[in-house]
Amino acid sequence: MSQAPVSPVRIGRLSIGALGTLALALGTLQTVVDPALPLLQRQLGVSAGEGALVSNIVLVTGAVIAPVAGKLGDRYGGKRVLVRLMALVVAGGLLASLATCLPVLLLGQALQGFMVGALPLSFILVRAHLPAGESQLGIGVVMALFTGGAMAGTLVAGPIAEALSWHWMFALPTIVIVVATLAVARLMPHDPPGPSDHRIDWAGVLLLSGALLVFMTGLVRVTGDGLPPLAVGALAVLVAGLATGWVVVERRSAAPMVNLRMLAKPAIWSACLLTFVVTTSFGMVTFLLPQLFALPADGHGFGLDTTDIGLLLLPGAIAGAVSDSVGGLAGRRFGLRAVVIAGAVGTAVAMTALMALHSTPWQLVIAKMLAATAAGVATTALLTSAVDAIEIKDTGIATSLLVVTRVIGIALGVQAGGAILDAGADTQTGLPSEAAFVTGFAVAGLVAASSLLIVRLAKVRSTQVRSEQIRDTKLRNTRKGAQA
């Protein structure tokens, strides 16, 4: 007697539960560092700039794996690649949970950065195993749980670190990831690999990650202990060489990690440039505020523990999640120019206010909410406007370019914030001075305000392009009329 076929929809729903649990745990693991970063700096005896590397290394790995994960899933099957990526994430979580020094923690964080590839791979699996009418719901569930996990990580980091130790902040989500991955491997049917005519751009991956790591590490050394001019020059040459090599490889590759030719389109280069500026400013804010919360209360800080810091960061996380979801609608309703200008002005005003008003926690909470809202709405509006301006077949290329730009911008902002605090540290206590925070807020505001100039220049460029297109269309019509 033949066995009755199992409903694919039921398999899909069970699989969505496993994928959702995995997304929840990954989101938690990604954000436990944010409120606990001052604690980690004290426990490991590292500076603010070195502490910034702890959160940045995840972003670097994510920036280079995001464009590659989808290609790997299409070629070898989403389930197969997802399970292997999660093995790397688990190894990273275990390393971080056992770390007793900064290098081991950085290695663990680097491996955890592979979690970024879980989202595109989950979307591949959802579309493969759910009917078309339910796949969008499944994708929404996975995204919502990942965002919810990110908020949960902000809240649970403190209680876990204080009740157990900071090592368990990494260990507990890692255990959940192991269980969820086993469930995905058991419940999810294998999706067949697809045909692929192009190789993965591993050279581009290595060059980009190398350039980012050398740049951020060099920035820590220059602003911390200091380096002789010759060493600084050598680092600059190395970063420039790696970045140039990456550009050359991307331009020549048949299947580049990031298609830089897409930057020739006005809608794309302006969106990337604005995204970079907006996220750099936001990255600085994201790093500076927890540092100020954690400084001793007998000075210009508040002496808060990890739990309190997490609670104060939560409103900003919620504001960012909400603004991400409405950014596209805001861009279509009010226009991209208005949304970006409003975000730039709001962030600049908030940072200017913080330069003078940072004596109570609620002032910092409101500033974080404003900055998160501005960054979320602006970057999502830029993403949707860029997608609307290109052909459907180029959607994946454009979105991957903008995702990489967003991650690099945040990483640069975080590292710049750490560098400013290191450069302005008190010579006696080694703690960041109040003037260093004021400088950081001023720089973040200036960076955000610079997007106003970019908006103006981008508009002029776009107008010129549209005029040239109209002129070319008229010429073609005239020639056709003459030939007729």
Image (cartoon, rainbow, N blue to C red):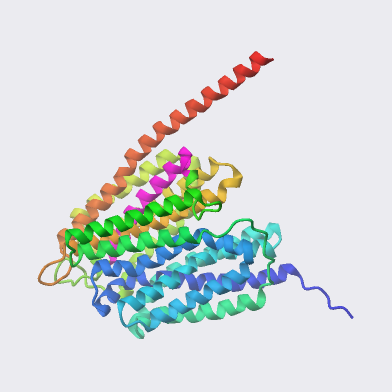
The magenta span reads 263-290
Give 244 or 460, whichever is nearer the viewer. 244
- Residue 89 to residue 383: above or below: below
Can residue 409 be seen here? The reply is: no
Residue furthest out toward the left:
428
**Is 139 inside the magenta-drawn segment?**
no
Q: Is residue 269 magenta?
A: yes
In what quadrant of the picture does the N terminus appear? Answer: bottom right
Instruction: Name which residue lies at 77% across and 73% down.
Output: 6
Image point (46%, 50%), residue name? 380
Q: Quadrant of residue 22?
A: bottom right
Q: Nearer the viewer, residue 322 or 142?
A: 142
Q: Nearer the viewer, residue 136 or 408?
A: 408
Residue drawn at x 67%, y 59% is 195
189 sits to left or right of 398: right
Viewed as shown, does residue 325 lie left or right of 349?
A: right
Residue furthest out toward the bottom? 164
Residue 47 appears at what percent x and percent y? 23, 70
Give the image location of residue 14, x and y in percent: 66, 73
**Residue pictured at 49% horizontal, 26% vertical:** 468
Q: Residue furthest right?
A: 1
- Magenta segment main secondary structure: helix
From what the image shows, is residue 278 above or below residue 309? above
